[in-house]
Image: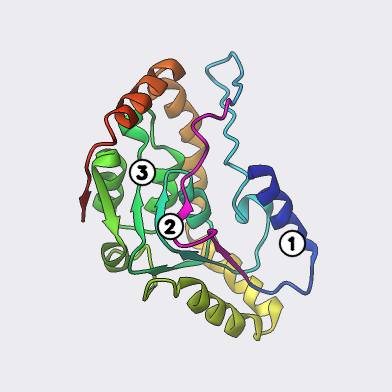
Amino acid sequence: MASQLTAVWREFRRDDAVRAVVVTGSGTRVFCTGIDREAVVEQPSSPYSIDDPLLAIGPKANDLWKPVIAAVEGMACGGAFYLLGEAEFVVASTEATFFDPHTTYGMVSAYEAVYMAQRMPFGEVARMSLMGTAERVSARRAYETGLVSELTPPGGAADAARSAAAVIAGHPTEAVQGTVRAVWSAREAARAQALAQAPHLIALGNLPPKRQAELFEGRRGAGGAGFRLR
């Protein structure tokens, strides 16, 4: 799926008929939960090199400067923030929830935290990153803190996002893409500097894969611990 997303963004970049994009999940239960826990990602032997297969799944990572709107139904966690972090804005249904499980499983929330720090107040990002699976941020709270720009009834996020995309697509595309670049340039320097630190923090802070798997299996074997919806 990661390679497919990369290919799609690059295709959209070259297609002049595409003027705005809506990214959403399949169905209403889940928007995105990140990388499959069963997936094996071979890493270089050097601690100074980290290969993250999700780094290229977002539109900006593929030099796409056409506006992208994320429509979230259901659960968005972990790797979902690579997509949410590179969308222009997020529309969510009232049943959407957001959380970052990394610390629960012995992993550093680096890229995800950086992406969300561009969207939410510092304390909100820190809390979501540190609480792991113990808390989920409700759609209402996400709206209050700026992660979500519009709330819809259940099942309505994609329609609302498409409606906004249709309006944007009706504007002159040169002006739209220039505006997208201008908005992103306001934060790009700090974002790029923070993302550059991410692989080093992951190399230092992540538990060995075997221990991560044990924590994951232990939680799943217990039926999954409960969580607080905030």
The residue indicated by pointer 1 is 13
The residue closer to the viewer here, 120 or 160, is 160
Give the residue at mark 3.
100
- Alpha-carbon span between mark 3 and mark 1: 30 Å
Q: Earlier in the sequence, mark 1 or mark 2?
A: 1
Marks 3 and 1, the one that precedes in the sequence: 1
Residue labelled with disc 2? 29
Q: Which mark is residue 168?
A: none
Q: Is residue 206 above or below residue 229?
A: above
142 inside magenta stretch: no
x and y percentages locating residue 222 in the rendered image: 27, 29
The residue located at (74%, 55%) in the rendering is: 10
* Residue plotted at (44% across, 50% down): 115
* Chief SS of the magenta region: loop
Which mark sits nearer the N-terminus, 2 or 3?
A: 2
* Secondary structure category for the residue under label 1: helix
Local secondary structure at mark 2: loop
* Quadrant of the snapshot with the C terminus: bottom left
Q: How many marks?
A: 3
- Which portion, as a residue range, is magenta? 21-40
Residue 165: x percent and y percent? 58, 77
Query: What's the image's color scheme?
Result: rainbow
Q: Amino acid at mark 2?
A: Arg
Alpha carbons under labels 1 and 2: distance apart: 29 Å
Instruction: Tell me which amino acid carries mark 3.
Output: Asp
Q: Is residue 164 visible?
A: yes
